[in-house]
Amino acid sequence: MEHTNFVPVLTAADWNAEYQNMQLARRKTDDAAYWDKRAQTFTTKDAPSAYVEAFLERAHIQPGESIFDMGCGTGALALPLARAGHEVLAADFSQGMLNQMIAQAHNEHLSSITPVCMSWEDNWHTHGVNKKAYDVALASRSLAVTDLRQALLKLSSVARRRVCITLATGSSPRTDERILREIGLPTLFGKDYQYAFNILANEGIKAEISYIESTRAYTFNTPDEALEHFSAMAVDASKTIASEREIDRALINLADWLEAELVLNETAGLPDEKGVQQGAWRLRKPRQVTWAFMSWDV
């Protein structure tokens, strides 16, 4: 039998290096100032949601366990965990997001949340976050990092028992790939969860994976507001992989698509899941986002 020099890509690939190259081709990650401004639009704390319930159900956190919640945002996980009696260190690089969580914790007289303003790239030790310091470490929809391997191992080092994360299965949680396809734009970058799974496997970590379906129902005050929103999304998602001519043509297609897909919102004026008043118009079909829930014991 003739010998071949076959090298399987699955075992030979440097998944973290490929992930880092992909990050260079993507849009720039939003900084703390962006999220500080975004936090101001949250008129109430994140309401109980199917996503949060599904995450906590899969996390299998035991009574009395301490929690490290990295990228906690406005406390979607930290607040219900504190209500359940857990000590939570909730970290985020946006002080604006932390302030929203702190205000809600104060309103509910919750004293078991310790907020810390820090990023994935910071020296966590200087913020009092040490190795094996917490029973369970969480990162819910927050792994927007340059070095995925470093972030995963850093998070895992903090946990004494278990780690739980979620990552988008599509190109980006803020990009509606359905619309991009309809208007003729490519979506080439995504599936971060596959990189994470392969990186963990190469480190000898046996991660389990399941999926959480999340619905996002955008609403708008006017059709022009919808067109502006989705035009910005389309340009942002495609400017590194499509020509100006292709994008201009797609934006014309977008106007036609929205004319057919925007309908009057029967729940206009009511608060959405983040407490923001709903607009008069909505898409005919809400967007479905699939999150990969990954967990492993340490």
Image (cartoon, rainbow, N blue to C red):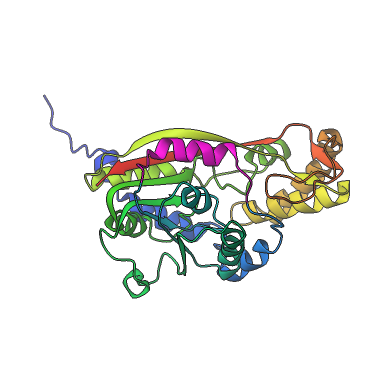
Q: Residue furthest front?
A: 109
Image coordinates of residue 282 in percent, x first then y, are 80, 39
Left or right, residue 262 beside residue 9: right
Q: Residue furthest top?
A: 1
* Quarter of the figure with the N terminus: top left
Residue at image coords 83%, 43%: 255
Q: Nearer the viewer, residue 140 or 86?
A: 86
Quarter holding residue 118: bottom left
Q: Nearer the viewer, residue 147 or 269?
A: 269
For residue 290: magenta?
A: no
Image coordinates of residue 173 in percent, x first then y, are 58, 47
Quarter holding residue 214: top right
Residue at image coords 47%, 52%: 82
Q: Residue furthest left?
A: 1
Say how many tags the image has: 0
Image coordinates of residue 263 in percent, x first then y, are 85, 35
Residue at image coords 73%, 40%: 183
For residue 52: magenta?
A: yes
Look at the image and tell me whether residue 173 can be seen: yes
- 117 above or below 72? below
Image coordinates of residue 13 in percent, x first then y, are 29, 47
Left or right, residue 33 beside residue 183: left
Look at the image and tell me whether residue 292 can be seen: no
Q: Nearer the viewer, residue 113 or 41?
A: 113
Q: Nearer the viewer, residue 248 or 79?
A: 79
**What span is colored magenta in the figure?**
46-63
